[in-house]
Every structure is written in structure tokens, then in C-alpha cells.
């Protein structure tokens, strides 16, 4: 009897297990179908909550479509409310009604749309965003409608590609631009001021070309200050050019999309702690300005710091300064390298420059410069070669100085000839630089006027 009971019990347990398994599978499939239906709803509410829960709002790093490869990235600030209201702000150059370049705020409506995925839709006119979407010729807005109705190829419907509490990424629904929003860590106008300060620190009107360096390769960038730069194997007449759009940030800049050099991926660059380079996310790629080339082609004048001159240069420099001090009608002379404001024939003097006042009152009108032309080249990164042609016939503009001064100036120019390793106080916009000769004991420091 016991054996039969055990057998019956075993059969019951087996049948129950089969029944439970079948029931479980059905319930799981049903639950999966239900969660698939609910997932978009849950994520929609999650996105809505994340958008609203941002005390300082968001910074939207906004890009337009790829079809018009002429636009930079734009920082647009956004503050969302549960009611469906959004306030946008920017100072971009396409603001209308005479607001271009001015801080402007505008409110409108937004909606989280549930399609195949989540879409953040800015579904009413907004003076900050709509100029990018409006189907007009951007150079003549709002007067000329483009035939294809694409305008600047901006998007107002943004498909969510990832989201977290502090960052949301999108693609433009129509033109596929990559757009990123990060929570603002400061008020908007402070963010804009800090971003401008960083932009000015790493770029300028006078130096806007860069080395981009990995262990395996060095390429060149140009045009960073414009927010859309070119990456190529050389600056002049490049064979291959890769254009990238970027947004400046308080710490550096971030590209619309990732790119590579020497097998290393980069997208965002931040200024390192000592301010010597912009570095990518994992530190494998660096960017510094071509400041050595800038010094070789210097349009301003940087002046010798007499206390730093060493070796054979010191004797020649001291002799020249002593002769200038004894010369008639020469007051407060100084010597530097750069481009003189005076002309020899039709050419400005590029090279050794002497500046002095021609009267005791030291008025602006009496400030005078003369120069000897030098040839400067960059044989390698961070180096400069200085050459002087002693037999040149158009290399001087010292006619108002006596023969002794002219002779000593030429002797200093001869002594300057050589190749130097350079160290600048900034790898982006240098205001002083140390020149140390490669093979002999001579060095000097040049300093730029604060006003320049």
C-alpha cells in the first residue's frame, strides 16, 4: 500500500510541476507583453520627472543637421515645468529682432511624445529655438523661404537615445543631428560668462590653429574659435579634411560626435590642471595651439626681459642698450622681436625691433620704432630657428639712429641667429616665452605688453 501511495504522490507532484511550469510561462509572457506596453509609459513619466527636476535647468548642446556643414554648436538653456511650459535662453548669433549675440529668454510649450521611442517635442514657436527650424534662408531670415523648406536643418522633435538623472542624449528626428542635454551646475548667465572666458583662454583672434596629438599621430586643427573646426594632416593646402562641430563649455569644448586619431577616440576636451593642454576623456589625445608658429609669425612685438638674457647675447644686448642710452634724442629705448609699425619701402619690418621716444615729453606722437628683418622658422614643434642676412640691403629702418647704434643692432641680430627650444607661459595664447639655444649657452625671455 505504501509503494502505491508513493507512486501516486510522485505522479501528482510531476503533473503539478508541469501544470505550474506551463502556467508560469504563460504568466511571464503575459507580464512581458504588459511590461513592453508599460515600459514606454513608465519611461515617458520618468523623462518628464527628470526634465522638471533640475534646479538650474539644463544646458542643451544643440547642433543642426549634417546637410549644411557651416554651423557651430549652440548652447541653449532650458527650464521645464510639469505644466508643459518650457523656458529657453541663449545668446546665439541667429536670434532675430536685433537680439543676435544678446542674452534672450523665450517661453513656449513642450511635450513628451510616445512613438516608437520617446520624443521630446518643442511644439510651439520659441524665439530661441525656432530660427533653427524655420524653413527660411538663414542669411536672410525671415524674408526668403528656401525651395526645399529645410532652412538651417534644425530639429524641434528630439528622439531620446539615452537618459539618466544628469544627462539626456537625442538625435534630431528629421536631420539626425546629435544633441545632448546636461543639468546646469550654475545659473545660465554665469555659465555663459564662464564658457566665454574658457573660449578666450584657449583661442583668440590672432592664434586659432592647433596640434592634436596622440602617441601615434599628430594632426592639425584650425578654426576652433568658430565652433566648427577642420582636422587635417597639414594646415595649408590639406589633402584630407574632417570637419567637426562643437560647443564650448566652462571646462573646454565638446564635439557633436566622436572622432579618432591614432586609434584613440575623442569627443570632449577639458583643460588640464596646469593649463598646458586640452585632453580627451581618457587622456590619450592632447590639443595645444600652434603657439610656436604664432611666435615665428608674431604680428605684435614681444620685448626682451633684460634680466633673463644669458651667454654671448648678454654682452651684445648690453652694448646696444648703452649706445641707445647715449644717443641724442633717444629716450626709454627697448628691444624686442615682432613686426614693427614702421615700413621699409612697402614692407613692414619683421624681426628685431627697437622702440624709443624722440623727445623728453615722451608723447604718443614721439614714439618711434625701427627694425632689422630676421627670418624665423619652426623646424620642429616647440622650436624656432632665427636667421639674419648680414648682407641684406632692405633689412633696416634705423635711419634716424646713429651709425654706432645701427652697427650694434646688427651685431645683436647676428648673435641671435640659431635654433632655440621654446617654453611659453601658455600653450594657447602666450604672453611670454623663454628661448634657450639648443647647442650653445645663450637664452632670453620675451614678454608681451599687457595692453596688447
Image (tube, grey):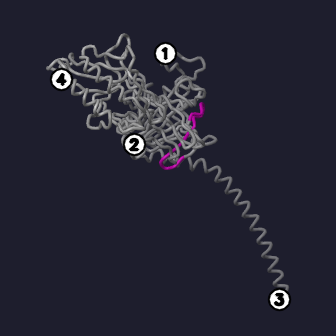
Please state, as top left, top right, bottom left or bottom right, where the C terminus lies in the image. Answer: top left
Comes first in the chain, label 2 or label 4 = 2
Reply above or below: 428 against 39.
above
Comes first in the chain, label 2 or label 1 = 1
Would you say residue 130 sits in the magenta stretch? no
Residue marked by disc 4: 326
Q: Residues within 10 Å of mark 2 (few under 14, many from 20)?
A: some
Q: Quadrant of residue 97?
A: top left
Residue segment shown in magenta: 163-177
Q: Are marks 1 and 4 in contact (CB under 8 Å)?
A: no
> Which residue is at 59% across, 41% downward?
262
Reply above or below: 32 against 145.
below
Residue marked by disc 2: 275
The residue at the far bottom in this view is: 1
Q: Are marks 3 and 2 in contact (CB under 8 Å)?
A: no
Nearer the viewer's eye, disc 1 or disc 4?
4
> Which of 268/294 is in front?
294
Residue marked by disc 1: 143
Amino acid at each position: 500500500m505504501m509503494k502505491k501511495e508513493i507512486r501516486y504522490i510522485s505522479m501528482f507532484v510531476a503533473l503539478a510541476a508541469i501544470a505550474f511550469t506551463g502556467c508560469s510561462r504563460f504568466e511571464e509572457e503575459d507580464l512581458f507583453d504588459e511590461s513592453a506596453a508599460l515600459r514606454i509609459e513608465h519611461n515617458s513619466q520618468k523623462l518628464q520627472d527628470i526634465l522638471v527636476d533640475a534646479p538650474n535647468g539644463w544646458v542643451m548642446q544643440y547642433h543642426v543637421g549634417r546637410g549644411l556643414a557651416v554651423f557651430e554648436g549652440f548652447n541653449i538653456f532650458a527650464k521645464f515645468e510639469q505644466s508643459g511650459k518650457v523656458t529657453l535662453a541663449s545668446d546665439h548669433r541667429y536670434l532675430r529682432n536685433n537680439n543676435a549675440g544678446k542674452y534672450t529668454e523665450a517661453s513656449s510649450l513642450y511635450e513628451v511624445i510616445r512613438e516608437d521611442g520617446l520624443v521630446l517635442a518643442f511644439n510651439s514657436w520659441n524665439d530661441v529655438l525656432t530660427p533653427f527650424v524655420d524653413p527660411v534662408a538663414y542669411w536672410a531670415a525671415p524674408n526668403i523661404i528656401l525651395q526645399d523648406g529645410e532652412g538651417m536643418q534644425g530639429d524641434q522633435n528630439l528622439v531620446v537615445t539615452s537618459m539618466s538623472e544628469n544627462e539626456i542624449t537625442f538625435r534630431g528626428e528629421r536631420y539626425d543631428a546629435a544633441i545632448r542635454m546636461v543639468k546646469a551646475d550654475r545659473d545660465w548667465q554665469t555659465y555663459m560668462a564662464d564658457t566665454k572666458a574658457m573660449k578666450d583662454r584657449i583661442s583668440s583672434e590672432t592664434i586659432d590653429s592647433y596640434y592634436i596629438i596622440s602617441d601615434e599621430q599628430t594632426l592639425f586643427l584650425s578654426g576652433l574659435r568658430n565652433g566648427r573646426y577642420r582636422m587635417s594632416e597639414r594646415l595649408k593646402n590639406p589633402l584630407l579634411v574632417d570637419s567637426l562641430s562643437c560647443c564650448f563649455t566652462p571646462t573646454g569644448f565638446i564635439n557633436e560626435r566622436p572622432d579618432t586619431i591614432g586609434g584613440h577616440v575623442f569627443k570632449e576636451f577639458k583643460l588640464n590642471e596646469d593649463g598646458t593642454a586640452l585632453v580627451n576623456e581618457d587622456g590619450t589625445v592632447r590639443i595645444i595651439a600652434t603657439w610656436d608658429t604664432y611666435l615665428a609669425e608674431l604680428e605684435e612685438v614681444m620685448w626682451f626681459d633684460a634680466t633673463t638674457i644669458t651667454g654671448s647675447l648678454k654682452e651684445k644686448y648690453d652694448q646696444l642698450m648703452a649706445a641707445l642710452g647715449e644717443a641724442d634724442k633717444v629716450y626709454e629705448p627697448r628691444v624686442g622681436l615682432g613686426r614693427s609699425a614702421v615700413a621699409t619701402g612697402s614692407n613692414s619690418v619683421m624681426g628685431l625691433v627697437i622702440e624709443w621716444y624722440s623727445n623728453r615729453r615722451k608723447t604718443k606722437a614721439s614714439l618711434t620704432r625701427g627694425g632689422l628683418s630676421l627670418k624665423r622658422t619652426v623646424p620642429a614643434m616647440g622650436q624656432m630657428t632665427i636667421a639674419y642676412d648680414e648682407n641684406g640691403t632692405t633689412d633696416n629702418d634705423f635711419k634716424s639712429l646713429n651709425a654706432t647704434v645701427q652697427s650694434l643692432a646688427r651685431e645683436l641680430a647676428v648673435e641671435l641667429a640659431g635654433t632655440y627650444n621654446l617654453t611659453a607661459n601658455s600653450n594657447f595664447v602666450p604672453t611670454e616665452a623663454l628661448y634657450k639655444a639648443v647647442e650653445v649657452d645663450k637664452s632670453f625671455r620675451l614678454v608681451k605688453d599687457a595692453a596688447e
